[in-house]
Image: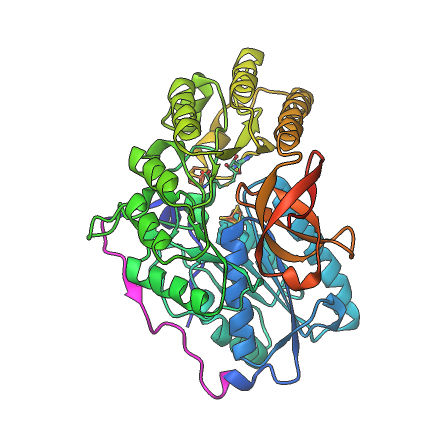
Amino acid sequence: MEKERPSYLKAKRRTKEEVKVLTDAYIMNNELSKIGIGKKYHLITYGCQANVRDSETISAILEDMSFTKTDSMEDADIILLNTCAIRENAHNKVFGMIGRIQHLKETKPNILLAVCGCMAQEVSVVDELERKKKTVDIVFGTHNIQNLPQLISEAIDKNEQVVEVFSKEGDIIENLPVKRDSMYKAFVNIMYGCDKFCTYCIVPYTRGKQRSRRKEDILKEIDDIIKLGYKEVTLLGQNVNAYGKDLEDGISFAELLELVAKTNIPRVRFVTSHPWDFSDEMIDIIAKYDNIMPYIHLPLQSGSNKILKLMGRRYTKESYLELFNKIKSKIKNASVTTDIIVGFPGETEEDFLETLDVVEKCKYDGAYTFIYSPRENTPAASMEDNVSLKEKEERLARLNKLVNEYYKENNDKLLNTIVPVLIEGVSEKNEDLCCGYTDTMKLVNVKCPKDYIGKIINVKITEAKTWSLDGEIDE
Ligand code: SAH
Ligand code: SF4
Ligand code: F3S
């Protein structure tokens, strides 16, 4: 039977059709569970936390099939690339990697290569991957991870390329297995997709219609991780504030957050919050519960009302600042980070100065800054891109300089204070140190015995750098 290929038209469509919750879509039988015996997989993940969480499911599925993990690409029998489509450079990285693997396959032709994730939802990418039949064996999208065992089995049996990508607004698939990267902190999806359609963004096309998970399913997953001793949960969604708007029981994100806080898991986090749906109830709940971390990622994108309108963000510079001030005044010690795009079509120097003005007013604890990258088939891609690359690069450098000053200034304020840190592991830079994050999401390298890994401890900050802090146990 001909498999489904992606379609831009279908990916864009939003209907009132009810979203189905499927609990038995993942099938693992005796035959499929033996395919990976004696074989190894190597999985590379690009992009955001949604992809990281998907990769945790992909790993578990492969291990259900008896594959074992390898960190070396050369050792693998199957290589999987879980891709991101958000900007052009994400694309380029993946095609560069495919080139490397093509090379590897010249000496090891039996390696299977699977490409999945958001790029696999793009029609033009799938067209190109189909031309690379000899290199790419399997292409699957973000809506059919549950079919991976059957796709691998088919690729091996037929010895030809297998492509399956659904673009219809997806269902919710429950009961997928998971092999988490960390033993202490866990990602839990609370919703999939996005209906905001910001004019520059490809996510509503690659991830489909907004679908909230039922609260029972979310709480069950959190209960499972609590039983396993996890200390932290991060609730994931492209716009968590809109959680529940598509559900019949009328539950809001503030209500869900309260239910999660009441599980008494030591740390609750959530990403991402769109300023548009940020309610006063949410702020009150975050302020009320000590186990909801005082950390909010609040993407600004631009400080210019003209550009915000062209982006379809539905807030103004003034309403953003009002929300920001409310958060800062009601939530004790709140740290706020942001995302900013420079060089959107039509952005003038004056518009850019408005962005810098917001950064000066908000003094962010951190910011992810990007040069606008046109994405095929999005409304912004057909706007005239009249800002030169040189100007875009200059604006990015000026923005980064300012952002970094505030990074350091905020870190300096923590010097000699005592902060709670969840110790996650050994520091990447120095094996003698452990590392972890504060309640406000700042990275700290800590001088402490390794048996503190997995515990939340009080740390005295002894040095503040731009990107991280140093500290020692406060006894
Ligand atoms: N759902 C999140 C964003 C996910 S994408 C939200 O709305 O906040 C992460 C960030 O990538 C965005 O906040 C935006 O700053 C950036 N981004 C998205 N599309 C982009 C594009 N076409 N070019 C440059 N940056 C982009
Ligand atoms: Fe993209 Fe906007 Fe949705 Fe975020 S809210 S994923 S930026 S469309
Ligand atoms: Fe990238 Fe897809 Fe996330 S495009 S940012 S991996 S939702």
Residue at the front extreme?
Answer: 475
| Residue 42 vs residue 137, the one in the foreground | 42
| Residue 420 vs residue 15, the one in the foreground | 420
- Looking at the image, residue 72 sits to the left or right of residue 453; the answer is right
Q: Is residue 76 above or below residue 437?
A: below
Indicate the position of residue 175 as horizontal and vertical percent values: 38, 70
Indicate the position of residue 267 as horizontal and vertical percent values: 47, 52
Residue at 43 percent of width and 19 percent of height = 317
Q: Is residue 23 magenta?
A: yes
Indicate the position of residue 297 as horizontal and vertical percent values: 48, 37
So how many labels did they put on this image? 0
Location of residue 425 by image quarter: bottom right
| Residue 319 vs residue 199, the one in the foreground | 319
Q: Is residue 120 visible?
A: no
Quadrant of image for the N terminus: bottom left
Indicate the position of residue 314 as horizontal and vertical percent values: 36, 27
Q: Name the main secondary structure of what is drawn in magenta.
A: loop
Residue at 66 percent of width and 35 percent of height = 416
Q: Is residue 67 above or below residue 294?
A: below
Location of residue 216 by image quarter: bottom left
Q: Is residue 302 visible?
A: yes
The quarter of the picture showing ligand 2: top left
- Looking at the image, residue 429 sits to the left or right of residue 123; the answer is right
Magenta region: 16-32
- Looking at the image, residue 294 sits to the left or right of residue 373; the answer is left
How does the figure colour the protein chain or chains?
rainbow
Residue at 64 percent of width and 26 percent of height = 409
Q: Is residue 182 magenta?
A: no
Residue at the top extreme?
Answer: 350
